[in-house]
């Protein structure tokens, strides 16, 4: 508050002082204020830029002031006298103080915005945890929850030690970064600690996607190894290619050396995050093979339903909420004007683009959810909330690439197509006997690839120029928007390169773990459930009583609640969430297990 008062007092003083020396007393106060703005526009600003994972942003211009400039403005004659020089020197000091305060305030606002966005993206880990827990059977709940915690914890250390340096260690070559290991010599003009935190939240999101594909049948050591490797090396290299200013396919490379004159536009990570996580999960699930009972002996699909639709819906809403940090937050700064030359006027700036990005994100997800709802109703004959949630997330994964450079109406097209991409890949997975408990490979890999292609078709000229300023004047944009084929070609290259890189790195890792018998659990452990065999007990307390009156303190009892009538529950009404064995129709009312 004191700083604000000081700035206001300084501004009022400068207005009156400046008016006395240069403008006539009869001018009104608005005219006096206008005089100061004219004067400020005559000074030479210094523009500070720093690289982030999308492009180079200009911070608020710092005002500079020289005595000679002000002396000439304040002088009434041809020569500059001593009093004018002293007045000019005094004014320069005041203006520089105001400039420093404004610059510091700008940095504070931008860093606060980025930190808040990082918190939102990190909250998506809770969404992933709830979604995964609800999508698996109750006997594997503790296992999948622990893997989500592991993704964040192991990813934090590996990204701090290696990942961030490989991604953004500038100056570097086009393939991989080589500075900032362990955040050495950080912060720097390239970024502050808030930037690291934000990028770490993205890295662990990619690892969380993979964990869903290999759920219910994977050894814990395999989770630890793949999560660390993904966040320390595989994901950072991809993010360096497309988000670092040094990356060979980045749209923010200095000069005009762009891929197809454009670079690949993947604003918030349809390819960098979602395709990386989805394709890594694809290879893990493919090498492991399907869960026991997922396909019968004739090859027909058998649905192994998750134990809690409520957790799935809760997780989906948390992910939806977090996506407003994922997509709009990827601008990294909010205090940036687009100038007075745009068609909207001075009220329009980066804050407007951020709002538009939130709108396109919402429309794509909503359209995909509704399309999946009615599409699955036509295909299978019922309304399924699990399918709707997956469709919603598929729409979000697709729009993530082009959310900042497309019109809101185009986001509806993106979500509509993403829904059918997901449905189609799920059908293909059944035909190929591929088992993914969360449909992560189909959702994040398939819809992420569609999102990159969508950007190459629908990116608009105006929005591309705003978001990726500083590039060539004739930067390509969407094919269907009249921008030619070059951007689409760059997007196709990204799809192929990401798929190839993840296959070449994660495929051998999962294959080696499988050969060493470190990947899949035993058949008996899988039938009993990972919670009991690997984590010391179940996630839910089925029967709780005073241990002091129990005959054996080393036993616990699971009980299934049966209907009050004597007839056994029919298959149509058997919806118990505590029944972990989908192939058993008769479960005793009480079971005692020694531990």
Image (cartoon, rainbow, N blue to C red):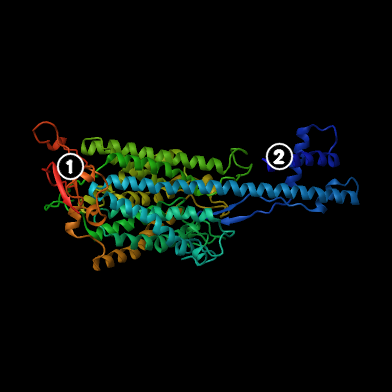
Label 1 element class: strand
- Which label's residue is closer to the chain start, 1 or 2? 2
- Residue 446 at x, y = what percent? 33, 51
Residue 522 in view: yes
Q: Is residue 427 above or below residue 23?
A: below
Residue 43 in the image: x percent, y percent?
Answer: 74, 49
Along the line of sight, the residue nearer the viewer: 348 or 203: 203
Out of 572 and 170, give the one closest to the viewer.
572
Q: From this view, report whether residue 225 is shown above or below residue 398.
A: below
Look at 53% across and 55% down and name the residue there: 193
Report the side of 568 relative to 409 (left or right): left
Which element is circle 2 on?
Answer: helix
Whole-percent x and y of residue 415?
37, 41
The image shows residue 294, relative to residue 321, as above or below, that is below
Q: Nearer the viewer, mark 1 or mark 2?
A: 1
Residue 241 placement (x, y as % from top left): 46, 61
Q: Is residue 38 left or right of residue 428?
A: right
Residue at horizontal 45%, vertical 55%?
Answer: 200
User: Which disc, if any, is residue 5?
Assistant: 2
| Residue at which label 1 appears | 559
- Above or below, 251 against 40 in this view is below
Residue name at image x 56 percent, y 61 percent: 186
Disc 1: CA contacts within 10 A as few (<14), some (14-19) or many (>=20): some
């Amino acid at each position: 508050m004191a700083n604000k008062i000081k700035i206001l007092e300084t501004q009022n003083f400068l207005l009156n002082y400046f008016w006395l020396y240069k403008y006539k007393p009869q001018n009104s106060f608005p005219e006096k204020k206008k005089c100061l703005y004219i004067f400020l526009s005559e000074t030479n600003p210094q523009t500070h830029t720093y690289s982030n994972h999308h492009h180079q942003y200009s911070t608020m211009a710092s005002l500079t002031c020289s005595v000679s400039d002000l002396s000439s403005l304040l002088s009434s004659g041809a020569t500059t006298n001593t009093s004018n020089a002293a007045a000019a020197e005094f004014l320069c000091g005041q203006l520089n103080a105001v400039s420093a305060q404004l610059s510091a305030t700008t940095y504070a606002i931008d860093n606060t915005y980025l930190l808040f966005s990082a918190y939102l993206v990190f909250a998506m880990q809770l969404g992933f945890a709830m979604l995964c827990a609800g999508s698996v059977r109750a006997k594997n709940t503790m296992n999948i929850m622990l893997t989500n915690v592991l993704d964040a914890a192991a990813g934090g250390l590996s990204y701090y030690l290696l990942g961030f340096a490989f991604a953004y260690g500038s100056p570097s070559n086009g393939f991989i970064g080589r500075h900032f290991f362990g955040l050495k010599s950080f912060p720097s003009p390239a970024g502050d600690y808030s930037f690291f935190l934000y990028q770490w939240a993205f890295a662990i999101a990619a690892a969380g996607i993979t964990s869903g594909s290999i759920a219910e049948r994977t050894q814990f050591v395999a989770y630890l190894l793949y999560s660390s490797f993904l966040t320390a090396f595989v994901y950072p290299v991809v993010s360096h290619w497309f988000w670092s200013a040094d990356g060979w396919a980045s749209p923010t490379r200095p000069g005009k050396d762009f891929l197809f004159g454009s670079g690949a536009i993947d604003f918030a990570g349809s390819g960098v995050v979602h395709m990386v996580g989805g394709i890594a999960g694809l290879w893990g699930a493919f090498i492991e093979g399907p869960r026991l009972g997922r396909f019968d002996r004739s090859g027909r699909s058998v649905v192994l339903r998750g134990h809690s639709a409520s957790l799935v819906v809760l997780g989906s809403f948390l992910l939806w909420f977090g996506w407003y940090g994922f997509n709009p937050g990827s601008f990294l700064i909010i205090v940036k004007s687009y100038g007075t030359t745009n068609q909207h006027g001075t009220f329009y700036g980066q804050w407007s683009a951020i709002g538009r990005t939130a709108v396109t994100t919402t429309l794509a997800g909503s359209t995909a959810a509704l399309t999946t709802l009615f599409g699955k109703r036509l295909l299978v004959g019922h309304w399924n909330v699990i399918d709707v949630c997956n469709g919603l997330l598929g729409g979000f994964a697709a729009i993530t690439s082009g959310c900042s450079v497309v019109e809101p109406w185009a986001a509806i097209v993106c979500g509509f197509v993403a829904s059918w991409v997901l449905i189609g890949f799920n059908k293909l997975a059944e035909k190929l006997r591929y088992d993914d408990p969360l449909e992560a490979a189909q959702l994040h890999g398939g819809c992420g690839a569609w999102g990159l292609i969508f950007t190459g078709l629908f990116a608009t000229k105006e929005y591309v120029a705003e978001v990726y300023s500083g590039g060539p004047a004739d930067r390509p944009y969407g094919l269907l928007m009249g921008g030619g084929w070059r951007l689409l070609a760059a997007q196709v290259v990204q799809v192929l390169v990401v798929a190839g890189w993840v296959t070449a790195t994660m495929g051998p890792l999962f294959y080696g773990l499988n050969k060493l018998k470190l990947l899949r659990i035993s058949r008996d452990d899988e039938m009993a459930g990972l919670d009991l065999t690997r984590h010391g007990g179940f996630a839910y307390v089925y029967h709780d009583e005073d241990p002091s009156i129990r005959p054996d303190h080393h036993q616990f009892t699971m009980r299934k609640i049966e209907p009050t009538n004597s007839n056994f529950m029919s298959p149509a009404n058997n919806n118990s969430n505590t029944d972990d064995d989908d192939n058993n129709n008769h479960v005793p009312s009480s079971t005692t297990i020694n531990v």
